[in-house]
Image: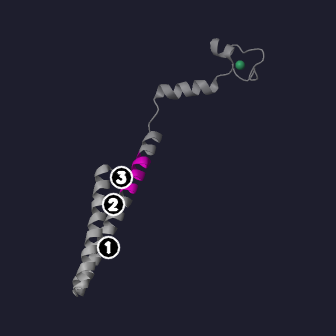
Amino acid sequence: MTPSARVLGWHYLAAAALTAQCAAVTARTGAGWHAIGLFVTSLLLVVAYAREHATARDRRAAAVKAERIARLSTPRSRAEDQAAIALAAACCERWWTSAGIEHDAACTRKGQTA
Ligand SMILES: [Zn+2]
């Protein structure tokens, strides 16, 4: 929730409390419909606060999801692909330094690759 949304939420709650108080005072004067109207208005302000909170949560979740998708969809360059293939095919150190011609004596892939 952004700071401005948080301040707006606190104002919603304060307005709801004030309107509920006005409904109670109005009910004591005998103006029943006005009291009901003020009470419903108070409830709507609480709903507005809850909605503001839910919207902030949804926005945060959408931002996290968009960031995750952006990270996963970053294309690798051709050089990165070639490096990954070369590293995956790498065998022993001697194979690496001899450009794939020789293997270490203890290499398990000796005879399998060039
Ligand atoms: Zn090897």
CB atoms of marks 2 and 1 within 8 Å: no
Residue, disc 1:
43
The residue tagged with tag 3: helix, strand or loop? loop
* Residue 109 visible in the current orientation: yes
Closer to the camera in the image, 110 or 24: 24
- Looking at the rendered structure, the kind of residue marked 1 is Leu
CB atoms of marks 3 and 2 within 8 Å: yes
The residue sitting at 77% across, 14% down in the picture is: 105
In the image, 104: left or right of 7? right
- Looking at the rendered structure, the kind of residue marked 2 is Glu
The residue sitting at 62% across, 27% down in the picture is: 88
Residue 49: in magenta span: no
Residue, disc 3:
1
Magenta residues, dominant SS class: helix
Residue, disc 2:
52
Q: Earlier in the sequence, mark 3 or mark 1?
A: 3
Q: Is residue 57 above or below residue 64?
A: below
In the image, 20: left or right of 76? left
Q: Is residue 20 above or below residue 105?
A: below
The residue tagged with tag 2: helix, strand or loop? helix
Question: In the rendered view of the protein, which quadrant contains the C terminus?
Answer: top right
Q: Quadrant of ligand 1?
A: top right
Residue 61: in magenta span: yes
> Percent from the top left, x then y, of residue 58?
39, 56
Nearer the camera: disc 2 or disc 1: 1
CB atoms of marks 3 and 1 within 8 Å: no
